[in-house]
Image: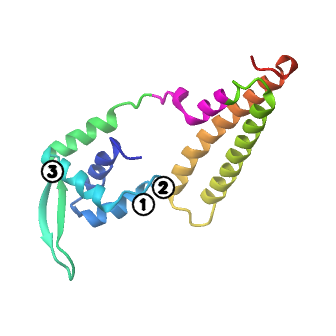
Amino acid sequence: MGGMSAPFVLLGLLWDGPKHGYDLKHAYDRTLPRAKALGFGQVYATLGRLERDGLVEQVGQDRAGGPDRTTFAITDAGREALERWVAEVEPPAPHVGSVLLAKVMVALLWPDTGRATAYLAAQRKAHADRLRELTAAKSAPGAAFGDVVAADYAIAHLDADLVWLRTTLQRVAQLPSGVVG
């Protein structure tokens, strides 16, 4: 996660009240525990853009025994922008651009199906192993709600990939004389 969604996640974290950039960074990482952590520099650069666009404003400075900490608050325009973003239905991802699909298609270009079969089997094992890890993590005692929801999302995608990998392996096995052509 990053790109276009990070500014809106930060706006969402400001919904219930002003926060320092430091607190926003840690709240972001807690809110999206399975996403790539957001760096402090990225947080402050994003807050700067949000402020420039009138979506957040500085509401205070605090020097609690350390460096100055600027407190940011969401503006009315920020609330409106966030509400529009959340209400906008996300187009389903066009999985035709995935690296997994590209590797399988390239493996299928080789005249001998042995390589494709070996790759598909290895990839299926990696997916199954990750599925077991996520299932264990989400059912661990004291697992945070956000971790469980993020694991559910990843598990659903892994399940879909596993079905596709299994189907593709079956299709390759049914090819005449083991040739993809």
Q: Which residue is mark 1?
A: 30
Q: Is residue 95 magenta?
A: yes
- The amino acid type, in three-letter code, at marker 3 is Glu
Element on which disc 3 rests? helix
Residue 167 relative to residue 85: left or right:
right
Residue 135 is inside the magenta segment: no
Q: Residues within 10 Å of mark 3 (few under 14, many from 20)?
A: some
Q: CA distance from mark 2 to mark 3?
A: 28 Å
Please, what secondary structure does the residue beneath circle 2 have? helix
Mark 2 and mark 3 lie on one chain; the one further toward the N terminus is 3
Q: Which residue is mark 3?
A: 51
Q: Are marks 2 and 1 in contact (CB under 8 Å)?
A: yes
Residue 87 position in % (x across, y down): 33, 34
18 left or right of 103 in image: left
Q: Is residue 59 left or right of residue 91?
A: left
Percent across and percent down for residue 74 are 19, 52
List x then y, in percent, for residue 115. Answer: 77, 34
**Would you place residue 67 above or below residue 7 in this image?**
below
Which contiguous range is marked in magenta? 92-106
* Image quadrant containing the C terminus: top right
Q: Residue 67, percent across and down? A: 20, 76
Q: Earlier in the sequence, mark 2 or mark 1?
A: 1
Determine which residue is flagged by label 2: 146
Of circles 1 and 3, the one toward us is: 3
For label 1, count other residues whose C-alpha is less than 10 Å away and answer few (under 14), some (14-19) or many (20+): some
**What SS does tag 1 mark?**
helix
Numbered circles on residues, count: 3
Give the residue type that dot 1 points to. Answer: Arg
Q: Whole-Å distance between the Cαs marked 2 and 1?
A: 8 Å
